Amino acid sequence: MKKSTSRRGFTLVELLVVVAIIGIISGMAVILVSGATDKAASTTSMATQKQLTSQVNCYMQLHNGLMPDGFDAMIRYDYATSGGAYMTLGSGNNSISVASDPSLFMGISPSSGTSGGAQNINRGVDSAAFSGQYRTLTVKQITTNDVTFLNQLGVNTLYYYPTNDLSYGQLKEMAKTISLAFVGAPICIVDPQSAAGQQLYNDFGVDLSDTTAYPRNGTSSGLNSWDDSSELTTAGRTAALQKQIFIVMAIGTYSKMIGDRQVGLQEAPASSIVSGGYYNRFAVVVKFAGLSAVGSSNSDRSASVVGILDPKGRGATAARQALNAIQ
């Protein structure tokens, strides 16, 4: 006689358990791969910052101390001049943009809500650089002294974005010659109010730790969702800007440094850590005289290159901290 045996199949519960285990393992793999990708992108971005610092210095050594011309202003010229809100910190054109208006900073059209969304037409840098507790940039109107310093450094042209069109043909039409007629035009600067901005000031040689000279909020003022106790008050921010200004300009397609065989930069440097339509070029930071009168002992009157920012507005120190935070 043949003995018959029956095989029991998997129950529904067992199948669900197996599927759940596979899902968990897959999720862990995705997280690990994603973390590795982010870390690789950030590492490359930091390496680019270091390389650009050397290349800018190399260019200046080879061109009698002059910077490469043709930087990008990183903001839309037409909206910043027509719709930008400024608060006066001194006389004349010594004005800084209001920190609560991200549309001014990022170059978002006022009609963005009806034209496909802000992200699709944003022509600024990553929003982290202009908003929240990590903001490092704001906008300043160029003064006569700024024009003089830029020209002395060899920077005679800035490229702005007057429309949503970023085609190269349009870029050539956006060139603005830096002259006295240029006074009042907007340009990005480092904002010392936030903790991130204060760190950049410190990295670039200006110590803002004196809470008497540069008072802090102490507690959240409730005016902005990103306020914290380490933020400078309005008076503290004004004092810091009176002490020193750091102008920020992006290395764009038409920079004279690109294509220079001696320098070795063949295209505008970009970073994969910024996506979604945001501006992704690296920027040069130049030290300028503060808003206090030129000639005052309170202001360093020299103009020089002090560093490179990544597309999120971070210097090398902050970029390294962010990289270490990636698990």
Image (spheres, rainbow, N blue to C red):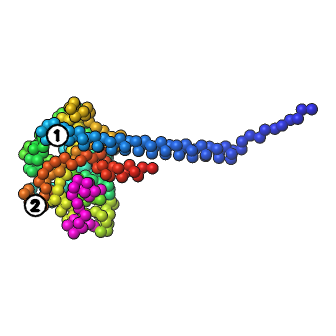
Placement of 234 over or under 155, stated as above or below: below
- Residue at 16% of width from left, 36% of height from top? 62
Q: Residues within 10 Å of mark 1 (few under 14, many from 20)?
A: some
* Residue type at the position of mark 1: Met
The amino acid type, in three-letter code, at marker 2 is Ser
Left/right of residue 68 with respect to residue 107 in the rendered view: left
Query: In this figure, which residue is indicated by the disc labeled 1?
Result: 60
Q: Chief secondary structure of the magenta span?
A: loop
Q: Pick the residue in front: 45 or 228.
A: 45
Residue 200, percent across and down? 26, 54
Q: Is residue 60 magenta?
A: no
Q: Quadrant of residue 169?
A: top left
Residue 317 in the image: state x and y as whole percent.
Answer: 31, 52
Q: Which residues are magenta?
A: 196-217
Q: Position of residue 222 (x, y in %)?
A: 31, 65
User: Mark 1 or mark 2, which is nearer the start of the sequence?
Assistant: 1
SS assignment at label 1: helix
Note whether 269 is above or below 95 in the view shown: above
Q: Is residue 296 left or right of residue 40?
A: left
Q: How many dots with numbers?
A: 2
Residue on which disc 2 sits: 297
Residue 182 image-quadrant placement: top left
Could you say where residue 120 lies in the image, as x and y percent from the top left?
Answer: 33, 41
- Residue drawn at point x = 7 percent, y = 45 percent: 180
Say few, some or many: other residues with alpha carbon within 10 Å of mark 2 (under 14 / 14 to 19 / 20 or more): few
